[in-house]
Image (cartoon, rainbow, N blue to C red):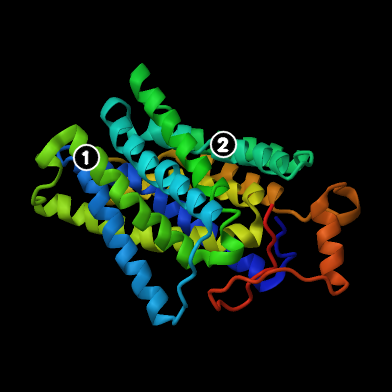
Amino acid sequence: MTTSGGGPGRRRGMIGAATAMFCVGTLTGVSPALHEYPVYGGQAVRYAAGAVLLFAVARARRLPPVRPNGRELLLVTLLALVGLAAFNVFIVESTRYADPATVGTIVATVPIILAVATPLMDRRRPTPHVVAAAVVVAVGAAVTIGLGGATFIGVLLALGALGGEVGFSLLAIPLLPKLGAIRVAAYSAAMAVPLLLVTGFVVDGPAMLRVPTPSEAAALAYLAVVVTAFAFFCWYDALPRLGAERAGLFSGFLPLGTIVATLLLGTGRPGWPEFFGAGLVIAGLLLGLRPTPVGARGDHTGQAEQGRRHGGGGQRHEDQSDEKPVAQQP
């Protein structure tokens, strides 16, 4: 996968990635409001509402429907299962057995995994300064919200959420060149609904859905509009602009979203560790986002960028967005 070399497209990717991860970070602060609501039914409602909103946006932008082939349909299904349904169930369940700070810290280690896994998937060596930056970002995230308390089950559930967060990016990469950000977000959200409804019926039976309380309804609406429709589009729009290797660094904004959510909900107040950790996150981002000389990369990315500068082309996203970068399937 190639990424945009710079300019407005890169800036848009950075803003989108930061916005998406900040919004997702607020999830751990909002999740306690849904502890009494059936998990699977609640997440099904949230994704159904998010999918409807995304399809409405696609229609408003006059994006023609694109039918995925067999491989793409499998990837969409896996993305919905791992990156959406499983991730959010793990998040909600983990906050029953661990502090939201603990869960946020574990999930915020995702840049280290993406910094190593993404280049290996492209059959190239990890970029040393990006890996180092990922470690700095992860440490900053840990310092920002602290370790909190957790049971062994809580840690395992948080690790499951971490795996879902990794899948949320890596499984989407092959889909974005053809489908574009809006379609990937809409299709995956819609696919998650039947998966959650079937699971909810097996686990909870008819009790998987009920009328939510006002606070539960507000939490579900927030998850549908902000954390699903808005954040998903921002993230999937940013991925091809930055590449998962560098986009993952912006998961350092996850704990910042958690802090803001707890402040607004009146459940916490930041101190010097939070500000120091935020400084580390920013330092890690500056380190990881600095340009890598093309001649020093020794990988296919540098060759692709050279080709692009000499008139080489690739596929464009079909969602008619401005300044879409050239992207190729890995």
Pinpoint residue 79: horizontal percent, then vertical percent.
46, 48
Q: Which mark is residue 230?
A: none
Looking at marks 2 and 1 on the same chain, the residue that comes earlier in the sequence is marked by: 2
Judged from the image, the secondary structure of the residue bearing numbered disc 2 is: helix
The amino acid type of the residue labelled 2 equals: Ala
Decide if residue 120 is in sight here.
yes
**Residue occupying the point 53% across, 74% down:** 319
Q: Which residue is mark 2?
A: 138
Viewer-nearest residue: 93 or 147: 93
Rendered location of residue 212, percent (x, y): 11, 50
Q: CA distance from mark 2 to mark 1?
A: 34 Å
Residue at left offset 34%, top offset 74%: 56
- The front one of 60 and 7 is 60
Q: Is residue 323 left or right of residue 262?
A: right
Q: Amino acid at mark 1?
A: Gly
Residue at point 35% right, 37% down? 91
Q: Where in the figure is residue 153, as x and y percent of width and height?
A: 34, 20
- Up-down relation of residue 297 to residue 8 (above or below): above
Mark 2 and mark 1 residues within 8 Å of each other at the beta carbon: no
Number of residues whose C-alpha sits closer than 10 Å to that of mark 1, classed few (under 14), some (14–19) or many (20 or more): many
State which mark lies toward you, 2 or 1: 1
Q: Residues within 10 Å of mark 2 (few under 14, many from 20)?
A: many
Is residue 41 left or right of 119 when viewed as pictured? left
Query: In the rendered image, which residue does mark 1 sit on?
Result: 200
Q: Is label 1 in a helix, a strand or a loop?
A: helix
| 44 to the left or right of 226 | left
Q: Quadrant of residue 305?
A: bottom right
